[in-house]
Image: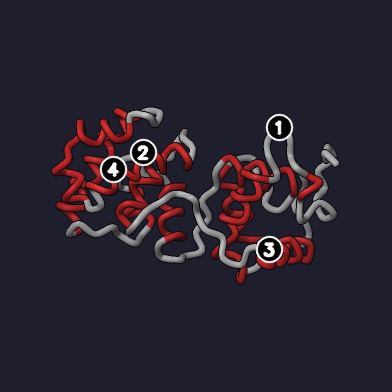
Amino acid sequence: MAKQLDYPVIREIFARFHAADPEPKGELEHVNAYTLVVAVALSAQATDVGVNKATRGLFAVADTPEKMLALGEEGVIQHIKTIGLFRNKAKNVIKLSRILVDHYGGEVPSSRAALQSLPGVGRKTANVVLNMWWRMPAQAVDTHIFRVGNRTGICPGRDVDAVERAIEDNIPAEYQLHAHHWLILHGRYICKARKPLCSACLIRDLCPFEEKTL
């Protein structure tokens, strides 16, 4: 784990990320807040590409909790059976849809606590929804962010909660909204786990990682 980078270095890193991609987007396909919640819940231990392939057909017929309930658990399974843990995820999708209809008028709540009360929705999922739909500076720490944060010293921490706090404490306020997307995309395509593409990295001169692949 690298030590925490100095504030001016972090500011320069995110200035570069911003210059290269001013409005980074999440890669999970969705059409409204509800389909975003479902997509993120389905993405646990699965790739965004795999989830998108499954949800295109699902969301074409069920883009509201009411329609999802009408489709039923077995109907959901038929659409998502290519995704890992699909049976349990289908149960959660139906349960969370029932709660949204019964307690929230079919609308997705905009508070972290309410979101985390939904089956299959943890803190990371809630933060993704808060950030992507309501544009709140919530930081969803996944394996990519955890690796990049610790490898580079941008936001080091021994667990995901510590990394989340490091992002909130050390990244300049004007970059908070998009911070987790920049870090996820950097980890997914450049700062990979086994063979980081250091020669193509925007921030390699600022990164203390000793095993650079140049």
Q: Amino acid at mark 4?
A: Leu
Q: Regarding mark 4 in the picture, which secondary structure is present there?
A: helix
For the residues marked 3 and 2, what is the alpha-carbon distance in whole angstroms?
31 Å
Q: Are marks 4 and 2 in contact (CB under 8 Å)?
A: yes
**Foreground pick, 198 / 10:** 198
Residue at position x 22%, y 47% in the image:
61
Neighbour tally class for label 3: few under 14, some 14-19, many 20 plus, Cα within 10 Å: few
Horizontal side, residue 208 vs residue 62: left or right: right
| Figure check: 206 above or below 172 | above
Disc 3: which residue? 20
Q: Are marks 1 and 4 in contact (CB under 8 Å)?
A: no
Q: Amino acid at mark 2?
A: Ala
**Foreground pick, 193 / 105:** 193
x and y percent of residue 142 in the render? 55, 43
For the residues marked 1 and 2, what is the alpha-carbon distance in whole angstroms?
28 Å
For the residues marked 4 and 2, what is the alpha-carbon distance in whole angstroms?
7 Å
Disc 1: which residue? 194
Label 1 vs 4, first from the N-terminus: 4
